[in-house]
Image (cartoon, rainbow, N blue to C red):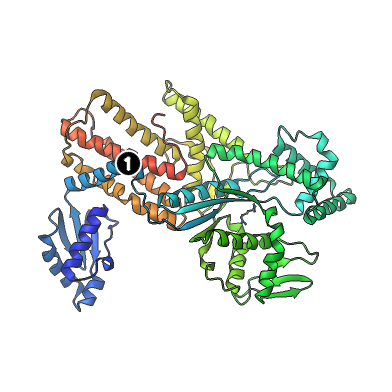
Amino acid sequence: MQYFLDRIRIAVAEATRTPPDQIRVEQPRDASKGDFAVPCFVLAKAANANPAQFAAELATKLAGDLIEMEVAVAGPFLNFRVERGELAKRTIESILDAGLSFGSSEEGRTKRIVIDMSSPNIAKPMSVGHLRSTVIGAAVKRLHKFLGFETFGINHIGDWGSQFGKLVAAVRRWGGGVDLENDPIKALLDLYVRYHEEEGKDPSLDEEARAAFRELESGVDGEVRAIWRRLTELSLAEFEKIYARLGVEFDLVRGEAYYETHLDATVQRIVDAGITEESQGALIVDLESIKKGMPPCLLRKTDGTTLYATRDLAAVFERWELHHFERCLYVVGMDQRLHFQQLKAVLKRLELFWEPRVVHVDFGMLRLPEGKMSTRKGRVVFLDDVLDRAVQEARRIIVEKNPGLADLDRVAEQVGVGAVVFNDLKRERVKDIEFVWEEVLSFEGETGPYVQYTHARLSSILRKAKESGEGAVPPDWGAVGDAASVLLSLGRFPQVVRSAAEHAEPSEVTQYLLGLCRETNSWYASTRVLGEAPPATAARLALVAAIQTVLATGLGLLGLAAPAEM
Ligand code: ARG
């Protein structure tokens, strides 16, 4: 694909004496127009000519040069249609040569991307929101890595705030009655719920909680801090189980508490910049000048305690010092839009040149059939249970379709977890998604299992060919001439990856894969691969291998396994 784009660009550049980088080569949406197109408006304008006339003259000049394609004029456009055998050979060979690195590049080298992802709160079950952050963040990270960027994933754990005073008080009072060691998340949830039930009846509870949080904030390393530390460790160990199932790792797991010791310096830096004000005893940064109506950023409350925003400021300063990032992406739900706008507004008021590099990668809500969660009321959905159920369902479907499958457990886990992940990445991230069990796991709809299944079918064709020894002769590329739409899609993969990374939008990859599977399946439905004239079979097998490679790479970038059989 790149080959043809370059050929056209250079030929047009030479014929018009324009620098090649100024020539736009597009892919028409309507494939019947051609494989590639060059709009001539700008070029004609520079030559002081009528665009249509200009296009017609240019076409005659190009005809002798671009022998592997037809050039047609359509008004102010030049359309190019590559000879089918040539399209097949170039596209397939470039994929098979590169293998799983087809689409990767070095373009991001020396550029660092920091990704704040997952970031759940301890002592609570991980929410579906944090699941989305984990899955989207990890995909964005892999996409950048694939393009050569240095990536740094940070799990910014919520381990600070007055709620921890409440938990410490609850552990002290009722900790003996719950099983913290063996079922920590459930135990902590029970304590949390109990606290909120009893809070109203017993005012001493609130006092104890406040005192506990004050002690935590003071930095004293006593009983309170020991309880808090234990809760943190227990929670992290639970989260780790989910990360392991999702295959997600972090370069740094750091609780907000870490920034406690940075807060004075952080606040001082902002005070020194002369942008703070006292307001009713609190320290604030006014943000009206950045955007009318934006509420001020509260740095320190009247009682001297600091806030989520202050800790995020401390964190972003440190991230900049350490990484000099090209971009610092915060993969956090839309409900925190204001928070990140304010964070950026403070950076703007500080006139930091890198402020535009700080980006809130926001996303919509995932609605589970169980309805809205409420930690306080103890009404929560455990993600582990969601994954377990998905795996169970996947297993049931697989047993039905392929009763003899070896390795059933492993494949069921890959398909079940993959289904949940894919569903999360399927739509533009800002859209809310409805989680409907039948849809998520269907082997035929727009799902992870559908893409995995297509991949497995192609793998099985290749296995059979290997057994029968087919495909070992030079291919007749003309025999895949009818697969132009598949070929053009395959060739587009590198661009899709680049665009998805730039927009931090994994759905560009999911949608691409779904399209490729649809095209592949309709080609396959009307074409025989095995048992044809050997050179034709060889070409079709090569195409099958190329598609299988791109599907495997794409699935991998999204965080799904690509089982060879299912
Ligand atoms: N723990 C926070 C929450 O659950 C999300 C943290 C996101 N990252 C950040 N740097 N603010 O709401």
Number of marks in the rendered image: 1
Q: Nearer the viewer, residue 470 or 394?
A: 470
Q: Nearer the viewer, residue 258 or 374?
A: 258
**Does 514 appear above or below 329?**
above
| Residue positioned 24% across, 43% down in the render | 93
In this rendering, does residue 517 appear at all? no
208 vs 32, left or right, is right
Residue at 71% across / 46% down in the picture? 375
x and y, in percent, of residue 539 in the image: 21, 37
Amino acid identity at mark 1: Gly
- The answer to whether residue 19 is above or below residue 398 is below
Q: Indicate the quadrant where residue 338 lies.
A: bottom right
The image shows residue 414 at horizontal and vertical percentages of: 48, 34
Residue 475 is situated, as x and y percent measured from the top left of the image, at 17, 37
Percent coordinates x, y for residue 548 in the rendering:
33, 38
Question: In the image as oriented, which residue stretches furthest toward the top?
Answer: 404
Query: Residue drawn at (67%, 74%), measured in percent from left and top?
Result: 272
Q: Residues within 10 Å of mark 1 (few under 14, many from 20)?
A: some
Q: Is residue 210 left or right of residue 8?
A: right
In this picture, residue 225 sits left or right of residue 34: right
**Which residue is situated farthest in the bottom direction here?**
48
**Which residue is at a point 48% across and 57% down the rendered structure image?**
112
Ligand 1 found in image quarter: bottom right
SS at mark 1 in the image? helix
Between 53 and 133, the one lying in front of the other is: 133
Residue corresponding to mark 1? 99
Residue 565 in view of the camera? yes
